[in-house]
Each structure stands twice: as C-alpha cells, then as structure tokens.
Image (tube, rainbow, N blue to C red):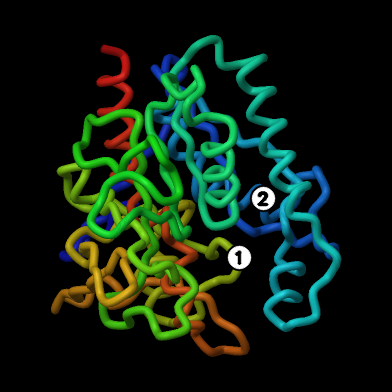
Amino acid sequence: MTLSADGTITRDAVAAHADARVDCFYVYPTISTDPAGNSSLTPGPGERRAVAQQFAALSSVCRPYAPMYRQITLAGLISAMSNKPLPMDRDLAYADVVAAWKHYLAEFNHGRGVVLIGHSQGSRWLADLLRREIEGKPVQKQIVAVYLAGYNFEVPAGQLVGGTLQMMPLCTRAAQTGCVVAWTTFRASAPPPENLRYGVSRTPGVETACVDPVALSEEPLSSYLPVKTNLLGVADARSEWETLVSAQAQDATFVNLPGLLSTHCVKSGSSSYLAVDLTPTLTGKQPADIPGDIRSQGKILNDWGLHLVDVNLVMGNLQSLIRKQAASYAH
C-alpha cells in the first residue's frame, strides 16, 4: 500500500516472477526465538517473519532461496550482551550457510547468475562465504551483486575495494555487476553515538562502507515498511501509526510513504552510515515518524539505529537495482 501526503491510498500486489533471469540467495538476521544459543533447523515464527518482511517481495525480480541455518539466537545475543553468554557455536552457524550454498549450487543453480542478500548476522556469514568460498574461484563470475545490510563491511578509507573483500568492489552504477552494496541505517536526527554498534571501523585507515541503494538505483525512495509488526514481531504502540497506517492498511503487509523519507550517506569521524531524513507533511495524512528502532524496557537503543528496517526502507530500490543488474548480467 502507498499512502501519499494528500491521503490518497494506492494498493499494489507483488507477484513472484516465474521466469526471473537470476536467483537470490538470502541469509536472514538474528531472529530465532529458540531458547538455546544456537537455533534448530526448524523454521520458527522469527525466521518466517524475516523471510516475509525482508525477502519475499524480491521474488518479483529473482528466483528466491532462503535456507535455514543454526544461527546464534536472540537468546544467545541477549545473553552475550548481558555478559552471561549461553553456550553457542558460531562455526556451526557458518558451516550451515556453507553447506546450504554448496547444496544450492549443486541442485538448483544450473549456471544461473545469483544475487547474495544478507542482513545483520546473515550479512556476516555471507561476507565470510564470499571470502572463503567465492572470491578468486570460478563461481565468482556468477555473482550478479551482493547486498549486505546492517553489517560493518570495511574498505580502505576512500577506496572501493579491499578490507572485507579483496576483489569485489563497492557498486557505483545501477547496472554494475559483481559488486557490493553495503549500508547501515540511522536517523539523520539521531546519528550514531560513541558506542555505536554498526557503521564504524576500529581499524586505522579503514572505514565502513555506505552505498545508498536509493541514489544507486537512480529512482525515488520506495519503502516496504511493515504495517502490523516489526521484524521482532512487536506492534508499533504509537496511536498516530495505528490511526494513519494500520487502520487504513486493512490487509496490506507493507506501506510506502512517498515524500516523507529521504536518504544520503554520511561520513563523520570513524563512522559511515546511511542517514534517513524525515520531512513530515502539513496535511496530517501521513505519520510524522516510522517504526524501526530497537527498544529495551521502553527505551530506544540508539547504538542500533534503524536496524529493524535496514532492508525495508529501500526494498523498492533493491528490486529496481536487481532488475537492472540482472539485465546487465544477461548481456
């Protein structure tokens, strides 16, 4: 659903593209609600929600693959942050991603081009996969593009390649292939604090990458903001969002709010991030703010930024980019 500044509502359906030119291989973020440090291989509500919110819409431009893996769970993450870590095995999580990748190549790929997409923990394992299993190997030629959101992807200061990867550069053109789009998102009005979790490199001479998917796509920002609940399954408690969005959306899954949001990359000291500006209209037909913050006991955790909507904020632009990159790859 699109909710314009004048209150006009437009409903659009997203359909899977059976003849998509390329595949998409997605590794989801930390989302499992299993109680142990590592998840099982049984899809839970978190995994299903992540695929629905971050990946399903991309089936309109690529053939989707979203493997399960025994990730570090939310319980494991919270325990580590509280300095009382549960037993957890990061090697197990990565090994599952590698096994899924090899199975995909052997059984489903058939020489097709593939887009790699990850968020947060998923981006970390994809970065490792690229380093260990893809760069410098024949399969690198099949990589149409890489999208790593909510992750500290590093490059030497002012450079397009080096750091996290040694051969694959950051994307600089919409139709460029074999390149990386990486970003972490913060409100322009709430830039990263000193204890920021994402968007900073601690290595001298190295910076985290910020590639703005909106500017790269050369199209207006197009968001797929979840209407009912966020990535963690929590509903937005603000009456304004409930009144202006949820009540009007009815059975809609996502909302786009044209004119309300804009993005640009910011470099400040050791941090580099995608800043999101909000420009509320005077009509009162759109909400003045969006969900996306991580909260603990009612308090916003500023070091996470808009982590929950890193992908949703630019989903329409990602679709556009994949279309253009797929067309370029085909030729």
Indicate which disc residue 80 carries: none
Q: In this view, does 275 lie above or below 310?
A: below
Residue 144: x, y in percent? 38, 27
Residue 106: x, y in percent? 66, 15
Front-most of residues 99 and 321? 99
Q: Quadrant of residue 198?
A: bottom left
**SS under mark 2:** helix
Report if residue 68 is visible in the image: yes
Q: In which quarter of the image is the C terminus?
A: top left
The structure residue drawn at horizontal position 38% and vertical position 35%, both measured from the top left corner, is 167
Q: Is residue 189 left or right of residue 99?
A: left
10 Å crowding of disc 2: few (<14), some (14-19), many (20+): many
The structure residue drawn at horizontal position 61% and vertical position 19%, both measured from the top left corner, is 105
The structure residue drawn at horizontal position 70% and vertical position 69%, both measured from the top left corner, is 77
Residue 189: x, y in percent? 27, 82
The structure residue drawn at horizontal position 25% and vertical position 75%, both measured from the top left corner, is 268
Report if residue 226 is visible in the image: no
10 Å crowding of disc 1: few (<14), some (14-19), many (20+): some
Residue 12: x, y in percent? 34, 41
Mark 1 residue type: Leu
- N-terminal-most mark, 1 or 2: 2
**SS under mark 1:** loop
Q: In which quarter of the image is residue 320?
A: top left
Q: Quadrant of residue 57?
A: top left
Q: Is residue 185 above or below residue 144?
A: below
- Name the residue carrying label 1: 232
Mark 2 residue type: Glu
- Name the residue carrying label 2: 47
Q: Is residue 29 left or right of residue 203?
A: right
